[in-house]
Amino acid sequence: MDSHVDRKQIRWNPRPRTRAGLHLKTEKLPYQRPVIAQPQFTASAIMVAERVDVRALSGFEIIAKSPFMVKLGEGGIAALFRYGAVVLFNASAEEKARLLGKIAMHSSGSGDIAAEEVAMIHVGPDDEEGPSGQFIKIKNADRLRLQLIAEVMAKATMLSFQERRAARDFDRSEPLARDLAEDGRFSAKPAELLKAVGNMLLAENRLNGRAGVLDRPDLLWDNPGLSGLYARLEGDYELHDRAAALDRKLTTLSHTSETLVETMRYHSSHRLETAIFLLIFVELCLGLYGHFG
C-alpha cells in the first residue's frame, strides 16, 4: 500500500480564535476639544444639599446632561448631581458663590461643606491617565474626562458626607445602649427615644439611597476607552471599601433601632398591664365595699 503523500497537496488553515476573551479591543476615543485650556487646574467636590433640582437651574450654558455640567462664565466648569454633590473645575471664588446662590433656591435638606474632596488636575498628552500623588493626570481636559472625574469625586464626597452623619448617629445611640447595659432601662424621656429612633431610620434611608456608588457610569457604555481611567480613580478613592463599611454601619444602626423600638414596646405594654391590674383591683374593692357596706 502506497503511503506516500505529496506534501504540496497538504494545506493547513489555522483555526481562528473565536472564543470570548482572547482578543479584547480597546476603543480609541475620538479627539474632543478641551473645555478647559489650562494645563493644570483645581477640582473640588462638595455636598451642598440632600437633593438638588438640577433641571430648574438657569443662567448657565449647559455642556452635558448626564451628569449635568455647565459653564460658569470665566473659564470654570461645574458638574451637578441630584443627590446634592457639586464638582467644580477651575472655578473662581466668585463663580462658586454665584453657583451656590442659584442652587440654594432649588435644593432641599442640609449639606456639609466640610465633606469636601480636592484634587489637582494635570493635563499631559503623553502621561498615563490616572491618579499620581496629589495629581490626577489626563491626556486632554475634554468634556468626557471631566464628566468621569466628576462622577468619581461626587461619589467620594457623598460617602464622606454619609460617613460623618453615620458617626453622629452612632454617638446618639451609644448613651442609650449604655443605659440598657447598666440598669436595663432608659434614662431619656420617651420623646427623646422616639427622636433617636427617627434619626436612625433616616440614616438607614440615606445610606440605602447613596447615589449608586457601585454603579458603572452611563458614559462608559458609549466610551469604553475611559474604563481604565475610571478603574484607577475608583480604586484610588476606595469607593467599594467605603461603601461596604457604610453597609456594615447601616446594619448596626438598623439593629439598634429595632432593639430600641422593641424595648419601648415592652415597657409600654408592661405599664399598660400594670394599669389594667390596678383598675381591676380598684373595681373589685369598690364592689366589695358596696356589697358589705
Image (tube, rainbow, N blue to C red):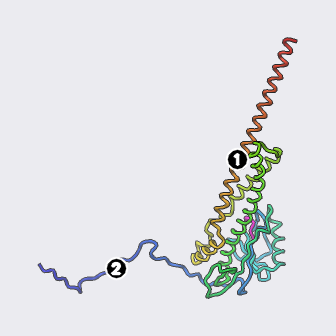
| Residue drawn at x 63%, y 66% as measured from the top left | 240
Quarter of the image holding residue 76?
bottom right
Query: Against 5, is 175 above or below?
Result: above
Pointer 1 residue: 258
Please state which of residues 62 and 211 is positioned toward the viewer in this rendering: 211
Mark 1 nearby-residue class (10 Å; few <14, some 14–19, many ≥20): some
Pointer 2 residue: 14
**Residue 119 x, y percent position in the rendering:** 72, 77
**Residue 112 x, y percent position in the rendering:** 79, 66
| Residue drawn at x 23%, y 84% as measured from the top left | 9
Indicate the secondary structure of the residue bearing disc 1: helix
User: Given the image, on which type of amino acid does mark 1 rest?
Assistant: Glu
Number of numbered callouts drawn: 2
Query: Against 285, is 187 above or below?
Result: below
Please state which of residues 280 and 211 is positioned toward the viewer in this rendering: 280
C-alpha distance separating marks 2 and 1: 66 Å
Please state which of residues 273 and 9 is positioned toward the viewer in this rendering: 273
Mark 2 nearby-residue class (10 Å; few <14, some 14–19, many ≥20): few
* Residue 213: mark: none
